[in-house]
Image: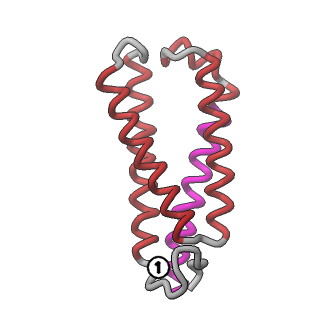
Amino acid sequence: MKHMNNTLQEALVANAVFSGTTGIGAIALADVLAGSLGPPAWSLRALGVGLVVFAAVVAGESRAPRARGTSRIIAADVAWVATAVIIIMVSPGWLTGVGRAVLAAVTIAVAALAAGQWRGFQMRGPIDDGVDQVLDG
């Protein structure tokens, strides 16, 4: 059972690192990225702050994964993927070609992270005490 929990914890840590790194990059490089990606720098900074906060939440969850918290993180990742696909498809003027490609690449990474978290979540085994039980086997 410990291996199963490690799979989930590793997936959550990977998500936290990716989200935090992406967020810090968006904050630090907003002025440079705005020209090549399309959105205004302020929106990239706001996105970066949101990603850093999300990374902190995910990192906290990775220490003692709970069904409810992990489910919410997976749901947030799935929402990111769905929203990004819609943005790429219906707002061609908002993002440059490079912006759409970068968003697509980030979205593929987020989908892979969500899949890894889901796999770890499914491997966790039965939960006896409801949705708030710590998933550390």
Which residue is rendered at x = 63% and y = 33% of the image? Answer: 48
Q: Residues within 10 Å of mark 1 (few under 14, many from 20)?
A: many
Q: Amino acid at mark 1?
A: Arg
Q: Is residue 95 above or below residue 56?
A: above
Q: What stretch of residues is rendered in magenta?
A: 1-25
Image x and y of residue 5, in percent: 53, 77
Which residue does the numbered mark 1 point to in the structure image? 124
Left or right of 88 in this view: 42: right
The C terminus lies in quadrant? bottom right
Q: Residue at x 64, y 28 (%)?
A: 46
Query: In this orientation, which residue lies closer to the viewer: 16 or 83?
Result: 83
- How many numbered discs, if any? 1
Q: Is residue 60 left or right of residue 2?
A: right
Task: Write the residue at 44% across / 22% down.
Answer: 99
Q: Secondary structure at mark 1?
A: loop
In which quadrant of the rendered view does residue 26 lie?
top right
Task: State which quadrant residue 121 falls in.
Answer: bottom left
| Furthest residue in direction front, as rendered | 130
Question: Magenta region's main secondary structure?
Answer: helix
Is residue 115 or residue 50 the one in the foreground? 50
Residue 54 is covered by the magenta coloring = no
Vertical comparison of 81 with 84: above or below: below
